Amino acid sequence: MPTMGALHKAHSGLIRIAREYAGQKGELAVSIFVNPLQFEPGSDYERYPRPEEQDEGFCRNAGVDLLFRPTSAEIYADDRSVFVEETTLSSTLEGKSRPGHFRGVCTVVAKLFNILSPDAAVFGEKDFQQLVIIRRMVRDLNFKIDIVAVPTIREGDGLACSSRNEYLNLEERKQAVVLRRALLAAAEKAKAGEKSAKAIVDLARKMIGEASLARIDYVDLVDAENLQPVEIVRPKSLLALAVFFGRTRLIDNILLA
Ligand code: AMP
């Protein structure tokens, strides 16, 4: 189970599913690595939380068998020259907003797979595009690893759990619930028969726009399999968004029925 640490409730959920999947005799390894390669210049690499002792206790209490917490120098040679790059699914959503992000993700996940040789790996649907891209990498590069998807785990008020939530001040945290509300309202509209992607996206944008501290990066409707934009809502459409509250960028998504 690859993570960037600052472990929280959602990571516990993933650990539980990973443990179930591994079974009594299986061993569960968690990696913690804040991967410099997936942070674009000027993003939050330096300030990303790194509560090392707390994370270690968290893993111990959760019954993790192996905690793999390498340094950057252990993972990357100074003269590295080989990377793993997905070239189609990465062109939209996060990939469009964060150039190079998925090249960093694929490269580090491929390396972690090679180092730890797992039979299976768990990934969260909160990072939906990441999950789809990892599945594609596993298929296209013939990794013999099952990819297990875990539904998004949320706080009581609906905000998706994230290590980045701790950057939010009180007012930002209060307003951030609008993301889930907007996704649910848009999904309702689709369920009621609205077929126009623009109408669905406009509704979500309007609701988010009513939160004074929200600054939308994107709200897009894409096909959940190829992640390309759709104009007409169809089964397996994914509504995905990235929104800033102050300097904090949050993402979330919902699958439309
Ligand atoms: P991170 O430490 O944020 O890189 O996340 C490690 C793994 O946990 C990734 O597979 C994420 O998709 C997953 N994850 C993080 N937050 C959530 C959440 N709220 N619900 C489900 N999975 C999550």
Image: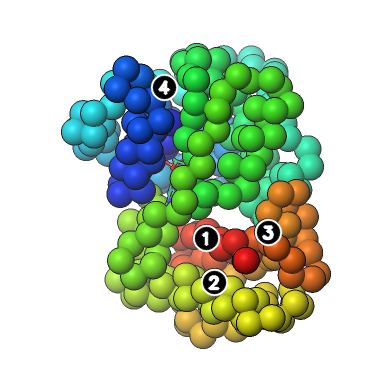
* CA–CA distance in space, label 2 to label 3: 15 Å
* CA–CA distance in space, label 4 to label 2: 38 Å
For this view, does 114 lie left or right of residue 235?
Answer: left
Q: Position of residue 163 (x, y in %)?
A: 38, 50
| Picture quadrant of residue 30 | top left
The crowd level at tag 3 (other Cα within 10 Å; few <14, some 14-19, many 20+) is: some
Identify the element where label 1 is drawn: strand
Q: Give the mark nearest the N terminus, 1 or 4.
A: 4
What kind of residue is marked 3?
A: Lys
The crowd level at tag 2 (other Cα within 10 Å; few <14, some 14-19, many 20+) is: many
Q: Name the residue under label 1.
A: 252
Query: What residue is at 47 percent from the left and 23 percent from the top?
Result: 72
Q: Can residue 153 be seen in this view?
A: yes
Q: Where is residue 181 in the image (x, y as percent from the top left)?
A: 47, 76
Q: Which of the pair 3/234 is nearer the observer?
A: 234
Q: Name the residue under label 3.
A: 236
Q: Name the residue under label 2.
A: 183
Q: Position of residue 218 (x, y in %)?
A: 65, 65
For residue 71, which numbered disc appears in the image? 4
Q: Quadrant of ligand 1?
A: top left
Residues tagged 1 and 2 counted as in contact (Cβ below 8 A):
yes
* CA–CA distance in space, label 3 to label 1: 16 Å
Query: Nearer the observer, disc 2 or disc 3?
Result: 3
For this view, does 46 lie left or right of residue 192?
Answer: left
* CA–CA distance in space, label 3 to label 4: 39 Å
